[in-house]
Image (cartoon, helix red, strand yellow):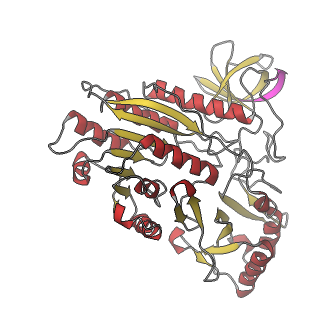
């Protein structure tokens, strides 16, 4: 049990950007706001048999990497915005810590070590967020409206007047948005505004639980004129999203290295950081090394973020996604870019894929795998099964580029690839898609080798915790 007068030395940061220390009894203590190398006094808020969770109350040795947060709403106090977790740490140190998180997960969960570490991909630390989901709350007792992210460790909406990770023109719009919602008849039935920026267009999707009055719709139009935004409405689920007024310009982003333009709707999944995405796609395809005569499969293809650039390099690309709607959107994007002849798309539940499914899809020279946080366990297991028990006429890919948004599930899948499917992890590196948050994106490259004898891997428990900004 940590004593109130016990000074703790912080050894590292965990996945939630908490300082990690050990008390005099050897018990792990997770400390909000503390950085590696610091010596702190804490107040313990939660105790378990193996660990304690605490808040820093005093410091006698400060880390050289501690910096002044760039946003006045960041902090540990009640009411602080919970969107960012690492603004108190120098940006370069954030990247180094995320790289270490990736290496540690590969080593401890997957028992894998990359032969070469890739230089981390990083970009602007501020104003980078081109997608965001802002909560809206009408506080009747105070007669005000709040628009922003949730408070730290709370379901309440933070009283945000600005946001430094949003583009400046969006940050400047937060207070006018509060005034707009407060003036509307349905102000207590408007729970969310989703932001999406593309091709110089700022789109705002208003979730409304009741039909908008004529007057409220006109207020949206007036706001759009003043602030140069495009309003979309969402009365129910994502499929109900539509423009307030037809005929507006189409959202999109460009991948100039490949001459690709990607149209999207504001509720579609696209990367929040377009600049990092451009670098990410370029590096992934250089590592994939797809040749003109090769066939490539892009698993979890989404709207074609990787599929279409690959099609400019390879003979044929198959994009596989779980949703028929997404598959049709991918086909449209391929047609839009004149790449229909080199691309095909299939809808399949990739969390239930089997060896028979892989055989039916056919052999491919290369794979690009870009799964959600849950990873690609079923897909990789099916590949491992086929490597251990080959089928006539089917061979596994000679190279796999795996793009991940969860280092734990990447490590789990890497363990299968290396220890069961017989691949080598030739390189891996972090991608700082979300500066100032604990979210770790990464990329790993695998090459086919000799299939090892079958072995049982340890069961891996993967944390599903998410930061507010993810």
Which sits in the foreground, 135 or 90?
Answer: 90
Q: Position of residue 63 (x, y in %)?
A: 78, 24
In this rendering, position of residue 64 left or right of residue 239: right
Whether residue 344 appears in this view of the structure is no
Q: Residue at x 56, y 68 (%)?
A: 265
Which sits in the foreground, 348 or 332?
Answer: 332
Q: Position of residue 11 (x, y in %)?
A: 67, 20
Whether residue 338 appears in this view of the structure is yes
Q: Position of residue 55 (x, y in %)?
A: 75, 31
Q: Residue at x 36, y 34 (%)?
A: 447
Which sits in the foreground, 89 or 292?
Answer: 292
Extreme residue in the front direction: 292
Of the 4 image quadrants, the one containing the N terminus is top right
Extreme residue in the top direction: 24
Instruction: Name the chief secondary structure element in magenta.
Output: strand
Extreme residue in the bottom direction: 214
Q: Which residues are magenta?
A: 54-62
In which image quadrant can residue 144 be found?
Answer: bottom right
In this rendering, position of residue 291 left or right of residue 156: left
Q: Residue at x 74, y 78 (%)?
A: 220
Q: Position of residue 183 (x, y in %)?
A: 81, 76
Extreme residue in the left direction: 392
Q: Residue at x 75, y 73 (%)?
A: 228
Compared with 330, 72 (above or below) is: above
Q: Does residue 329 belong to the magenta stretch?
A: no
């Amino acid at each position: 049990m940590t004593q109130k007068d016990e000074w703790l030395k912080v050894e590292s940061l965990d996945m939630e950007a908490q300082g990690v220390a050990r008390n005099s009894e050897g018990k792990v203590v997770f400390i909000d706001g503390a950085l590696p190398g610091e010596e702190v006094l804490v107040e313990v808020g939660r105790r378990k048999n193996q660990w304690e969770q605490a808040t820093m109350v005093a410091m006698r040795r400060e880390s050289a990497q501690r910096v002044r947060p760039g946003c006045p709403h960041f902090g540990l106090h009640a009411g602080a915005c919970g969107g960012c977790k690492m603004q108190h740490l120098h940006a370069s140190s954030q990247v180094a810590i995320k790289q270490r998180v990736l290496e540690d997960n590969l080593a401890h969960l997957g028992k894998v070590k990359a032969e070469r570490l890739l230089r981390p991909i990083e970009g602007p630390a501020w104003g980078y967020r081109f997608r965001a989901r802002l909560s809206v709350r009408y506080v009747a007792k105070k007669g005000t409206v709040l628009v922003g992210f949730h408070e730290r460790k709370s379901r309440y909406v933070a009283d945000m007047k600005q946001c430094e990770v949003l583009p400046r023109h969006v940050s400047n719009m937060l207070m006018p948005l509060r005034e707009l919602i407060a003036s509307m008849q349905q102000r207590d039935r408007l729970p969310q505004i989703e932001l999406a920026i593309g091709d110089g267009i700022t789109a705002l999707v208003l979730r409304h639980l009741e039909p908008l009055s004529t007057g409220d719709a006109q207020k949206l139009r007036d706001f759009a004129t003043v602030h140069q935004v495009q309003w979309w409405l969402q009365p129910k689920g994502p499929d109900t999203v539509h423009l307030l007024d037809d005929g507006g310009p189409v959202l999109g982003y460009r991948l100039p290295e490949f001459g690709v333009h990607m149209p999207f709707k504001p509720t579609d999944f696209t990367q929040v950081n377009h600049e990092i995405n451009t670098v990410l796609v370029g590096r992934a395809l250089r590592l994939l090394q797809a040749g003109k005569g090769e066939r490539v499969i892009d698993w979890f293809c989404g709207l074609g973020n990787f599929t279409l650039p690959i099609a400019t390099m390879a003979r044929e690309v198959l994009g596989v996604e779980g949703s028929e709607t997404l598959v049709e959107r991918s086909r449209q994007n391929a047609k839009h870019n004149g790449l229909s002849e080199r691309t095909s798309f299939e809808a399949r539940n990739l969390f239930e894929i089997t060896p028979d499914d892989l055989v039916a899809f056919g052999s491919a020279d290369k794979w690009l795998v870009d799964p959600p946080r849950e990873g690609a366990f079923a897909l990789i297991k099916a590949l491992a099964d086929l490597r251990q028990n080959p089928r006539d006429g089917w061979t596994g890919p000679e190279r796999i580029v795996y793009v991940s948004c969860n280092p734990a599930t990447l490590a789990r899948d890497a363990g299968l690839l290396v220890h069961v499917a017989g691949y080598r992890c030739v390189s891996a590196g972090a991608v700082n898609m979300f500066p100032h948050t604990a979210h770790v994106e990464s990329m790993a490259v695998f090459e086919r080798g000799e299939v090892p004898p079958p072995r049982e891997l340890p069961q891996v428990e993967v944390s599903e915790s998410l930061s507010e900004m993810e």
